[in-house]
């Protein structure tokens, strides 16, 4: 089922603002399915965003549960968040957490082509560190690189309440 955001006023649609969130989060939670059972795994990621096309890259060992699940069903869902700041209030319902987040769905593909794997790892390291790294064939042979072509995504920002901002 697809549905729009309930708290519309918190939705982020500006591409540059979404980029800033993608630059900061560092970790994504990748949702997979094992038959009718869900499985979620945290992973570091890299991304590219050209126009509105978002592509994510993750990497890991060459064997494991998530790879088995992707091979069986490449449909994935992901979530990432940053700027997580809990705040207090006088009543229980005034407590909350400020945050920025992105989530969406797409298709995962385990890359076989060595040059594509190198590209994915370079993008991952650029997102994670801001630095440019190069990879040789030996380095890419010992890891799996997964490309996630995102078909739809949304971003959301819950700022700190104004009163809290003025206190800081
Ligand atoms: C902040 C963070 C960043 C990470 N970044 C990466 C990354 O970039 N690349 C990467 O490959 N891995 C990363 N990991 C580790 C990752 O979460 C998985 O443990 C790893 O990728 C193996 O996943 P798998 O599905 O192949 O599990 P397997 O090794 O096949 O094991 C499957 C079983 O182990 C359990 N399990 C797997 N992972 C975890 C976990 N994290 N915590 C508790 N139980 C677990 C599952 O419940 C399942 O029963 C990161 C973990 C954290 C917390």
Image: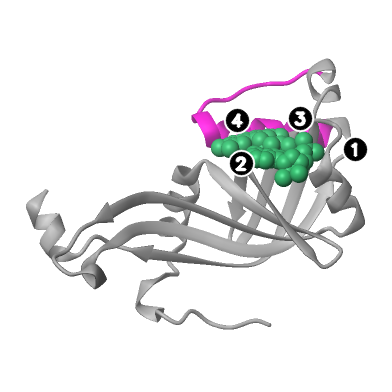
Marks 2,1: beta carbons within 8 A: no
The residue indicated by pointer 4 is: 125
- Of callouts 2 and 4, the N-terminal one: 2
- Of callouts 4 and 3, the N-terminal one: 3
The residue indicated by pointer 1 is: 112
Label 1, residues with CA under 10 Å away: few <14, some 14-19, many ≥20: few
Name the residue: 84% across, 19% down: 137
Depicted 55 relative to depicted 63: above or below: below
- Whether ligand 1 has any atom under 8 Å from the Cβ at mark 4 is answered as no
Q: Quadrant of ligand 1?
A: top right
Label 4, residues with CA under 10 Å away: few <14, some 14-19, many ≥20: some
- Residue 12 placed where, x, y %? 42, 68
* Magenta stretch, residue numbers: 115-136
Taking the view exactly as shown, the residue that stands out farthest to the left is 167
Q: Is 125 within the magenta?
A: yes
Q: Which mark is residue 118?
A: 3
Q: CA distance from mark 3 to mark 1?
A: 11 Å
Name the residue: 61% across, 41% down: 46
The residue indicated by pointer 2 is: 46
- Residue 96 placed where, x, y %? 29, 63
Nearer the camera: disc 3 or disc 2: 2
Q: Quadrant of the N terminus?
A: bottom right
Q: Is residue 165 left or right of residue 50?
A: left
Q: Is 104 within the magenta?
A: no
Label 3, residues with CA under 10 Å away: few <14, some 14-19, many ≥20: many
Give the color scheme: rainbow, by chain, secondary structure or one colour: one colour
Secondary structure under tag 4 reads helix
């Amino acid at each position: 089922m697809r549905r729009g955001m309930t708290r519309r006023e918190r939705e982020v649609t500006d591409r540059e603002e979404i980029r800033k969130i993608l630059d900061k989060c560092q970790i994504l939670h990748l949702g997979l399915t094992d038959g009718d059972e869900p499985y979620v795994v945290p992973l570091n990621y890299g991304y590219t965003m050209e126009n509105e096309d978002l592509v994510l890259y993750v990497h890991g060992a060459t064997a494991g549960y998530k790879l088995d699940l992707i091979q069986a069903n490449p449909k994935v869902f992901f979530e990432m968040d940053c700027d997580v700041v809990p705040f207090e209030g006088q009543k229980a319902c005034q407590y909350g957490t400020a945050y920025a987040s992105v989530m969406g769905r797409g298709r995962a593909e385990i890359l076989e082509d060595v040059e594509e794997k190198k590209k994915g790892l370079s993008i991952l390291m650029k997102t994670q560190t801001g630095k440019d790294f190069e990879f040789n064939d030996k380095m890419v042979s010992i890891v799996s690189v997964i490309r996630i072509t995102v078909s739809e995504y949304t971003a959301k920002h819950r700022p700190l309440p104004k009163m809290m901002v003025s206190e800081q």
